[in-house]
Every structure is written in structure tokens, then in C-alpha cells.
Amino acid sequence: MAEVIARDGTWTFDGELIRIVPGGDRKVHNLRQALGELAVPLRAISGITYEPGRKGGRLRLRLRDGADPFLQVTGGKLADEADPYRLAVDKDTAGAAEYFVDEVRNALTIEQVPPGACEHYLLNGPSVPLTATAGDGTVSFDGMRIRIEWTEWAEQVKKSSGAREISMEDVHGVEWVPIIGFTNGFLRFRVTGASALLPKHDPNCITWGMRREGGTISLLAAAVVARLPHPSADHEAAPGRTRPSGTGSGADTAGPGDDHDTVLRRLRELGELHRDGVLTEEEFAAAKQALLREL
């Protein structure tokens, strides 16, 4: 087992999972503390690096696209200190951090973890029910319905509309944006049939400015996203349309590029079945050779 212990938190790797536990120091960002312990399966990881610095360094874990509903909402918009997949380490811990990186990279190579996007979430979203307050509203989510109640800082147009209840059946997207410079942050639920309005006027959106959100808003957003169709579903063919594939009735309409992509996808699926113990070593090898002959 590889382990890195720092004031920022503790990372451990047992060959299958990286467990991330945020530190209890008051300087650790409240969002990371609100997230709590994370268990990241190896097949959700696309890479890991150790970046040395003058007074220490930091570990950075990169996840495959579509592996984590939390990153689906916040990816690329979190400050370093709020990023749960970053760990600051001091000089005395640098050796352990470098060893940790080597162990994870070796495991990724041995297990042949594919670098591409995931077809379903490999990490669970935050547990529900959840309630969070920020700026002009309080949002509650029980897994089936979203309820928004307005605070005294809400625009009159929102207050006049009263409390808002949204069924998950009507939600087709979630947008979370933190405070950027002098621009307010907001959480918007994209609802079927709703008009496009400014966040401060949109009854499906809460905003915050000087009253900074405490971290649970993004957790609630991730909980909703985890219960929506996975992003890969956006690329599925519409009902009634023929999907290109290497076999079956759609084979005649698939070009060479489609056949190649299909074989690669089926190879990844075989690898997952092999890792999960569904296929024996012999069955996996035979099936893989059969697919490779199709390339």
C-alpha cells in the first residue's frame, strides 16, 4: 500500500482504489471538508503527477471525462485550494509522493485502464437529502424533487413567484458557476420549456455575490447531475435510428472509422469484464484476438 500523509489530507492506494481524506486543519478549504472521504477506483483515473515546488510540492490526480458527477459540474472552475484531487505536500513528504505516483502509474499500465471518456459514472454523487443556502435562495434536493425558497436578498420577481418546486423529470441540465472577479456565482437548473433569463431573474436559478456560498451548493448540484442521464447519452442515436456497429443490421451503413471505433470500444468492454472477473484469462485472450482481427 502507498500512502501520503500531509496537513492538507491523506491519500492511500491499495492497488484498486485511491482513498482521499481531507485534512482537519482550519486552512483546508470548506468545500473539501464538505465533500468528505472520496474513494476513486483505478479505472476512473486518467493520470497522476507530482509537481515539485520551492517549499514542497503537490500531487494532482486526473480523472477520465465522465467518471465523477462532481467534476462534471465543477471541472475547470475550482480554485486549487478547493480541488479535492490536489494535495499539497511538504519537502519531507516528497519521496512518499513520488513513490505514490509510481505505484498508481504502474497499476494503470498493468490494468490497461483506457484513457478515454467513461460511459457511466464511476464515482457516486453526494448523498441526499441535501439543503444549501447562498445569496438569494435556499435549495433542497431529496433525489426526486428540487425545492427553491427565496431569501431577503432575492429580486422581487423571484419573491413574487413564490417557492419553486422542480421535478427531476423536467430537468435536463445543471450549471454551476463560482464568483469570478466582480461577477456573481450562480446555480441554474435547466428546465424543459423555461425561458432564457438573467440568473438574478431566473426562478430556476439562485445567485450569490458578497455572501459567498459555503461549498454545499456545488455538492447539491453534483447530486442532481448524478441522477441525470450520463453525458455519453448525448451521443446515443435517437430512437428509431440505426447506430453504426461492427455487426448487425447497421453494419452496412458504418464506414471504416465507425468499425474501428466499435472494435476499440468492445476491447475496452472486454477489459472491464476481465478486470471484474467475468471472463477468465483464456476467454479474455481469445475474445481479444478475435476482435483484433477485425481491425
Image (cartoon, rainbow, N blue to C red):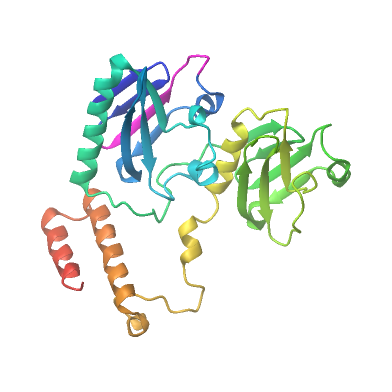
Q: Nearer the viewer, residue 228 or 29?
A: 29
> Is 201 left or right of 183, judged from the image as shown?
right
Q: Position of residue 43 (x, y in %)?
A: 31, 45
Query: Which of the pair 93/181 is nearer the observer?
Result: 181
Q: Is residue 19 magenta?
A: yes
Picture quarter with the C terminus = bottom left
Q: Residue 265: image x %, image y %?
A: 30, 63
The answer to whether any part of residue 240 appears in the image is yes
At 20% from the left and 39% from the top, the residue drawn is: 106
Quadrant in the picture for residue 57: top left
Residue 15 shows in this picture: no
Farthest-out residue, left = 282
x 62%, y 48%: residue: 175
Residue positioned 82% across, 37% down in the render: 154
Above or below for 161 versus 5 = below
User: How many dots with numbers?
Assistant: 0
Give x and y (percent) for residue 131.
Answer: 65, 33
> What residue appears at the point 38 percent right and 34 percent down from the top-left corner?
39
Q: Is residue 27 above or below residue 214?
A: above
In the displayed structure image, the side of residue 116 where residue 183 appears, left or right: right
Q: Quadrant of the N terminus?
A: top left
Residue 201, image x, y percentages: 80, 47
Region rendered in magenta = 15-27
Left or right for 77, reference 107: right
Q: Residue furthest front?
A: 54
Identify whether 173 is placed above or below 103: below
